Amino acid sequence: MTHPPAADRQPWFKQKIFWLLMAGPILVILAAAATVYISARAGSNDMVSDDYYKDGKYINMQIERDAEALKRHIRAQLLFNPEHTAAKVFVSGDFERERPLQLVLLHPAKQEFDTTIALKATGTSGDKSEYIAELSNLPAAVHWYVRLEDAAGAWRVGNKWLPKQGATLDLPSADTP
C-alpha cells in the first residue's frame, strides 16, 4: 500500500492551492472595507441635490439676475492682494450706489469653503465706484467661482478666477466680451 505524498497530509490551512484560490475573494473583501471606511470619513456629498425642481426654479431666478446686469451694463474688476486676504473692487454701470454690494466666493467642490463678504464703499474713480473686501484666508483651490451682486438680489455678475494666473479678475455682464 502506498502512502499519499507528505503535502496531501497537511491540514487545509497549510495547503498552497487553498491560499491561491482564496487570495481573490480576500482582496475584494479588504477593498470593500477600505471603500466603506473612506466613504464614511468623507461625509456628505455637497455636489448632489435632493430637490431638482426647486434647484431648477432657483437657476431660472439667477438667469434673470444675469440678464438684469446685462441690461444695466454692470461690469466689475477685482484686484486681489498677493496673500488673497483683501480685494479692491471697481464697479461701473447703472446700479444704485447706496445699496450694499456683496462679493461671493464659491469653492468648486466644498460648500463649507463658500464665502460671502459685504463690500465697504471707499469712493469713486471716474465712472466707477470703489469698494474693498476683507477676506479670510482662502483655502487652496485651483479655481474659484466669483460673483458680485447687490444685496437685494436684483442683479449679479460673475466669472471663474484662477489664482495662479494672476490677482486680477474681470466680472463682465453675461454675454459681454
Image (tube, grey):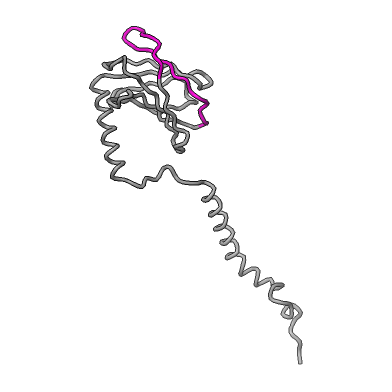
Residue 126 lies in the magenta stretch: yes
Q: With 6 as the anchor, is 50 left or right in this view? A: left
- Number of labels in the image equals 0
Q: Position of residue 22 (x, y in %)?
A: 61, 68
Q: Position of residue 162 (x, y in %)?
A: 45, 27
Residue 5 lies in the magenta stretch: no
Q: Is residue 37 above or below residue 173?
A: below
Q: Position of residue 157 (x, y in %)?
A: 33, 25
Bounds of the magenta segment: 119-140
The image quadrant where one finds the N terminus is bottom right
The picture quadrant where one finds residue 18 is bottom right
Q: Residue at x 69, y 72 (%)?
A: 13
The picture quadrant where one finds residue 62 is top left
Frontmost residue, 165 versus 61: 61
Frontmost residue, 33 versus 50: 50
Q: Residue at x 31, y 25 (%)?
A: 156
Q: With 169 as the anchor, is 66 left or right in this view? A: left
Q: Residue furthest left?
A: 71
Q: Position of residue 83 (x, y in %)?
A: 53, 21
The image quadrant where one finds the C terminus is top left
Q: With 119 as the anchor, is 84 left or right in this view? A: right
Q: Residue furthest bottom?
A: 1
